[in-house]
């Protein structure tokens, strides 16, 4: 049993998820007192680590190493990384706290809904909107991490525009997820709501 767990844990896709989890405390340390150089380092690390999200899923499917542990670690790593970066950006006064609160609240609400859906046997697949949400969040956070004017681009201003876009898409995808969940619930269990 212990060997099975070790084998399940120590495959490359799960190791990449663990690297993303480990990047969160690194981001905290780098962003405690960032100047221009540390901001660039934080943005590069964030971008590289975010790219492993796509890679670990692709490898797991390609190699047939999709595991229950991997299905747990992958979304956990994503959310930890995004939420950590956003919270640190609040402390640096690069993003309004209320925006972060709305984005994090949506993530918690959808995670809770997914758990409830799985327990009731309902599968609600990912949509293009969820992918756009993730990409918009990564783009906004990267720009806000860069913060300074570099290569003739004001990254703080760009980040502000992108975080507004990310907020709209994040809330839209959250609403879409809830609508699809309740629609599916009514189709699969039409009488349960009337009891």
Image: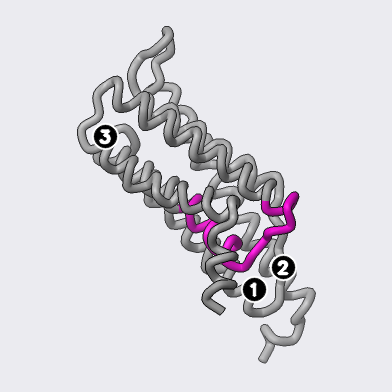
49 vs 154, left or right, is: right
- The outermost residue toward the front is 3
Which residue is labeled 2 in the image? 123
> Are there few (<14), some (14-19), or many (20+) residues within 10 Å of tag 1?
few
Which mark is first along the chain, 3 or 2? 3
Q: Which residues are magenta?
A: 60-79
| Mark 1 vs mark 3: in front | 1
Quadrant in which the N terminus is drawn: bottom right
Can residue 100 be seen by looking at this rendering?
A: no
List the residue tagged with mark 1: 118
Q: Magenta-highlighted stretch: main secondary structure?
A: helix
Determine whether 22 is above or below 153 in the image.
below
Give the number of the mark in front: 2 or 3.
2
Measured from the top left, where is residue 83 in percent x and y?
40, 49
Q: Does the rendering let one see residue 36? A: yes
Whole-angstrom CA distance, mark 2 to mark 3, is 39 Å
Looking at the rendered structure, the secondary structure element under dot 2 is loop
In percent of the image, x 64 and y 73: which residue is there?
Answer: 118
Furthest residue to the top? 152
**Residue drawn 38% across and 51% down?**
101
> Which residue position is annotated with label 3?
93
């Amino acid at each position: 049993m212990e060997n099975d767990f070790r084998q399940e844990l120590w495959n490359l896709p799960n190791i990449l998820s663990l690297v993303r989890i480990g990047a969160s405390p690194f981001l905290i340390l780098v962003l405690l007192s960032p100047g221009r150089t540390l901001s660039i380092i934080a943005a590069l690390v964030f971008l590289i680590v975010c790219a492993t999200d796509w890679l670990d899923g692709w490898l797991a499917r390609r190699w047939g190493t999709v595991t229950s542990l991997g299905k747990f670690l992958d979304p956990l790593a994503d959310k930890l990384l995004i939420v950590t970066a956003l919270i640190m950006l609040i402390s640096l006064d690069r993003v309004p706290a209320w925006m972060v609160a709305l984005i994090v609240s949506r993530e918690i609400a959808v995670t809770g809904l997914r758990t409830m859906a799985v327990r009731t046997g309902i599968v609600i697949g990912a949509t293009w909107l969820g992918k756009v949400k993730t990409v918009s969040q990564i783009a906004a956070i990267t720009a806000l991490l860069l913060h300074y004017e570099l290569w003739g681009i004001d990254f703080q201003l760009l980040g502000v525009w992108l975080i507004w876009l990310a907020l709209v898409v994040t809330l839209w995808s959250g609403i879409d997820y809830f609508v699809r969940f309740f629609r599916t619930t009514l189709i699969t269990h039409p009488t349960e709501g009337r009891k």
